Image: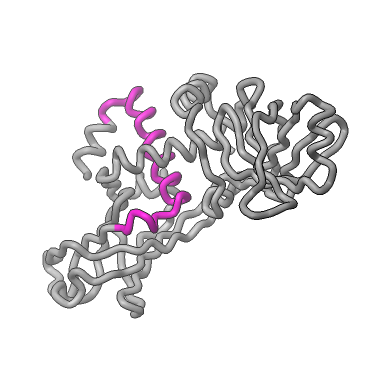
């Protein structure tokens, strides 16, 4: 897990402290939440639970109440500690911590007689590790909308920053796999070069594969070809603009691009000439 400055942690906290994050399968994967190691601690007892949503000010968790949990909460005046455990992608070590909280409300979950949803309010600001893990995801999600059309040309410098070894990839067009070369990336799409004729692929749906390293990750992203242009000197090839289906863009892909763009912006503060080079390349 990257080490953020205390200033950046504070920015995340102030900017996102009231935003609830739902722990979908995608969110669990990109944060590395180890769901089997999440518990409520009341007194000296631990109770397995599932984190449904969380923010920097509280959480909603689901737990079985047929185990005596409600009685234990009454005995502790509804004070608990929520145990989180993460193994961020690419890391070998786990990050474990407790967040002190108070149960503000509880209600049956769905139609179950055995399971309740508990609304927790954190007693204090959560640990910096938690703010970094969740803030990084929220920052990527916000910037994927604000900067969705910023193109990152896949030159050697940007490939190094993105941990992309090769621009060679593949695109599946209506079930037919084709080899292609990636020319640029953005939150909203990509430009590729491949063998073919523009009129036969325009407006067709496709799925492109984008491979990253450190850690190794491959994303399959669905989209649609919306523009095409000839490749100078190569009549048998075509350059195509693929616009992603916004709902199909994986959070892990957004984080990869956002980490690169935010770190590059930080570099520009110390070397403004680099920004001119980047803008000229795009």
In the rendered view, how is the structure colored?
one colour
Q: Residue 208, located in which quarter of the rendered image? A: bottom left
Q: Looking at the image, is 177 positioned above or below residue 265?
A: below
Q: Is residue 263 magenta?
A: yes
Give the residue drawn at x 56%, y 37%.
Answer: 133
Q: Looking at the image, is 10 positioned above or below residue 255?
A: above
Q: Residue 144, how many percent across, how many down?
A: 35, 43
The answer to whether residue 37 is left or right of residue 258 is right
Look at the image and tell me in which quarter the C terminus lies: top left
Q: Is residue 155 magenta?
A: no
Q: Residue 241, how many percent across, how many down?
A: 22, 60
Give the residue drawn at x 37%, y 34%.
Answer: 264
- Residue 115 visible in the shown view: yes
Give the residue drawn at x 40%, y 64%.
Answer: 209
Q: Residue 129, how many percent across, how many down?
A: 62, 31
Q: Main SS of the magenta segment?
A: helix
The answer to whether residue 162 is left or right of residue 132 is left
The answer to whether residue 94 is left or right of residue 202 is right
Give the residue drawn at x 61%, y 52%.
Answer: 110
**From which residue to which does the magenta span run?**
244-273
Outermost residue toward the bottom in this view: 176
């Amino acid at each position: 897990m990257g080490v953020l400055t205390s200033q950046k942690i504070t920015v995340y906290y102030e900017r996102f402290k009231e935003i609830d994050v739902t722990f979908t399968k995608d969110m669990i994967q990109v944060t590395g939440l180890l769901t089997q190691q999440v518990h409520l601690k009341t007194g000296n007892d631990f109770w397995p639970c599932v984190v449904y949503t969380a923010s920097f000010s509280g959480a909603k968790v689901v737990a079985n109440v047929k185990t005596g949990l409600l009685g234990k909460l009454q005995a502790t005046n509804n004070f608990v500690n929520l145990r989180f455990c993460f193994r961020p992608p690419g890391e070998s070590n786990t990050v474990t911590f407790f967040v002190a909280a108070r149960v503000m409300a509880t209600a049956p979950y769905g139609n179950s007689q055995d399971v309740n949803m508990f609304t927790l309010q954190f007693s204090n600001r959560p640990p910096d590790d938690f703010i970094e893990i969740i803030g990084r995801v929220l920052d990527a999600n916000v910037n994927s909308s604000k900067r969705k059309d910023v193109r990152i040309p896949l030159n050697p410098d940007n490939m190094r920053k993105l941990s992309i070894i090769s621009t060679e990839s593949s695109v599946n067009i209506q079930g037919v796999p084709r080899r292609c070369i990636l020319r640029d990336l953005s939150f909203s799409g990509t430009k590729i070069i491949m063998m073919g004729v523009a009129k036969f692929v325009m407006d067709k749906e496709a799925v492109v594969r984008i491979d990253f390293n450190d850690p190794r990750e491959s994303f399959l992203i669905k989209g649609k070809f919306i523009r095409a242009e000839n490749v100078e000197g190569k009549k048998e090839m075509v350059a195509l603009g693929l616009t992603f289906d916004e709902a199909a863009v994986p959070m892990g892909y957004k984080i990869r691009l956002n980490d690169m763009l935010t770190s590059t912006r930080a570099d520009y503060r110390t070397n403004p000439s680099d920004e001119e080079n980047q803008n000229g390349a795009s």
